[in-house]
Image (cartoon, grey):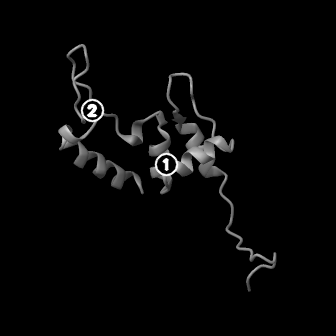
Amino acid sequence: MNLTKLAEARNVAAQRPSQCRAGAGAVAKNGFRRERVPLSDRAAFSPAEFAALCGRSPTWAYRQIYAGRLKPIADCGRLLIPRSELDSFLARKAEYNPVTIGGAARQ
């Protein structure tokens, strides 16, 4: 899922605040309205948001963390993946080289 599709999904959810956990314009305890920061401006992502940016499932993102391929921030009581980790993860791309079960490459 690309950034625009994810933003559209969030906008749809924002129009139905009663069905969302916090809603798009949730009112904080101090009475001020809190607006969501767009994904393009975020410094860190949840595992589900990271997975959505890569077009994968949230389970896949957690597997990447547990395998040591991603280094999340875990100090604040939840896992956050810094934007720098997303950039370095995408920079490690490799050319797809399909191999059959017997070890010989397809022709």
Q: Residue at x 81, y 79 (%)?
A: 104
Dot 2 or dot 1, earlier in sequence: 2
Location of residue 9 in the rendering, given as x and y in whole percent from the top left corner? 30, 51
Residue 88, placed above or below residue 44: below
Residue 100: mark: none
Q: Quadrant for the C terminus, please.
A: bottom right
* Type of the residue with mark 1: Pro
Relative to 8, 49 lies left or right: right
Residue 22 is tagged as: 2
Relative to 75, is 67 above or below?
A: below
The residue that mark 1 highlights is 58
Identify the residue at horizontal 50%, vertical 54% (top origin). Answer: 54
To which quarter of the image does residue 35 belong? top left
Front-lying residue, 105 or 91? 105
Number of numbered tags placed on the structure image = 2
Splitting the image into 4 quarters, where does residue 68 fall? top right
Give residue 40's position: percent from left, percent from top.
40, 42
Indicate whether 100 appears above or below 13. below
Answer with the quarter of the image where residue 95 lies: bottom right
- Of the 4 image quadrants, the one containing the N terminus is bottom left
Residue ID at (57%, 27%): 74
- 3 or 51, which lies in front? 51
Callout 1: 10 Å neighbours few (<14), some, many (20+)? some
Q: Residue at x 50, y 29 (%)?
A: 78
Query: Which amino acid lies under the numbered mark 2 shown in the image of this protein?
Result: Ala
- Of helix, strand and loop, which one carries label 1? helix
- Pick out the residue farthest to the right: 103
